[in-house]
Image (tube, helix red, strand yellow):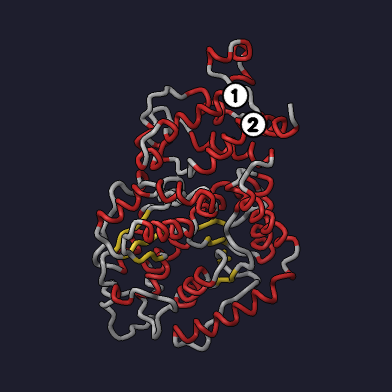
Amino acid sequence: MTETIELALKTLESQLNQPLETALEACARCGICAEACHYYRAEPKVEHIPAYRSEQLRSVYRYEHDFLSRIFPTWTHAKKLDETTLAKLSEMAYSQCTLCRRCTVNCPLGVDTPLMMRAIRAMATAAGTAPEILVMLADSAIEKGKDPSFFKDMFLDQIRDMEVQMRDIMGDPNTTIPVEKQGAKILYVPLAGAHTILPPAIVFNAAKEDWTLSIFEAANYGVFLADVNRAKQVAKRIVDEANRLGVKEIVIAECGHAYASYRWDVPNWFAGQFDFKVRSLIEVLAEYIRDGKIKVDPTTISAGVTYHDSCNLARNGGLIEEPRYVLSKITTDFREMTPNKAEALCCGGGGGLVALAEYTDRRLAAGKPKADQIKKTGAKIVVAACENCRLQIGDLNEHYQLGVHISALTDLVVRAMRLPKPLPGHEAEHLFEGEKAPVLGD
């Protein structure tokens, strides 16, 4: 047995807790999960049935844990793990499953197929067969956390430039983007790029919030690799920053996997060191509008708007009504996709897939059910509160010629605040014909 196979099997054994063993043992092969999967809906073939995918891991599991399977593997469909099988398992777990969990919520027995796909991803990572780009991105984030001084000066220069832009948009020369503010109430953790910093900064300033900006980004590629060690190292940067600054809560940018990991996993990883709550920026937007901390005008946006439920935010995170509440206050023509909320179809870009260029064709094909959903609404603006979803729907928009404008939720909120100047880079101005003279909040 090669060292690669030994590492993969050792990793599988280390993950065999009760939830994973239950998932491996409980499947009734009923096939109900097939129609729940966007891959199968896009291309109905056996390889795209979640039960079939999980069966590939079960065959290895049987060989290792069932005496009869070692003697008569053909009888039990058991398979000894070799490098060819590991490579096939790895490609399947990364390119044919976005870990959306729609199959799980529709399974009569609650079989957690994504949990098994994560086990395969962990095996692939340990054995060195995981996608190289995801490994590089995770390791880069870890290195960035070891010596923030290497990039901090350049980051602060970019923030100062953004402050100038923000003051111009808001018409207020006193607004700031605080960084490393000791004792702030909120630590806002953005993604890479000004588009996830400037709009939230405008909202925080308009609400007169006591906040500070994290010097790190929320994305955690260790999560996509199912590598807990890497994921913990990436997350530790922000946990340490929050503790050092003494903040009361962490607010995560519009990002599905980042919210899910910091809301559910990270508090368990850092029990005893995690003395603050975690919220999504979506929840904060809903609170500010509900409490009158920011003023919005629903007549600003004239075009039809639909909302895509990110799998990690809605089905896996429970953030379902908050974005709809926000949209109800900033639009007059909201159109639901069907199905939606906890039953929403995955866009096809989750699980890190949107970062894997080698699977672009497969990703676009798997996204066709979502493209069809969008087209049926007739909406011209698609709101997605997740960066990966926006990237994927943007690609679907081009590939399937949907003719829609994709937006973050915060961008539309800022638009509805009717500030003296709009956010930069807004194409499709014809979708906002309802604009009138600026109406500034307190």
Q: Residues within 10 Å of mark 2 (few under 14, many from 20)?
A: many
- Judged left or right of residue 269, residue 440 is left
Real-space Cα separation, disc 1 to disc 2, in angstroms:
9 Å
- Please tell me whether residue 129 is drawn above or below residue 169 in the rendered image: above
Q: Position of residue 390 (x, y in %)?
A: 43, 60
Three-letter code, disc 2: Leu
Residue assigned mark 2:
12
- Viewer-proximal residue, 401 or 252? 401
Q: Are marks 1 and 2 in contact (CB under 8 Å)?
A: yes
Residue assigned mark 1:
61
- Judged left or right of residue 136, residue 374 is left
Task: Name the residue located 54 percent from the left edge and 85 percent from the top edge.
Answer: 164
Q: Quadrant of residue 321?
A: bottom left
The answer to whether residue 209 of the structure is visible from this angle is no
Q: Position of residue 271 (x, y in %)?
A: 65, 47
Q: Which mark is residue 30?
A: none
Three-letter code, disc 1: Tyr
Give the secondary structure at mark 1.
Answer: helix
Q: Position of residue 291 (x, y in %)?
A: 38, 68
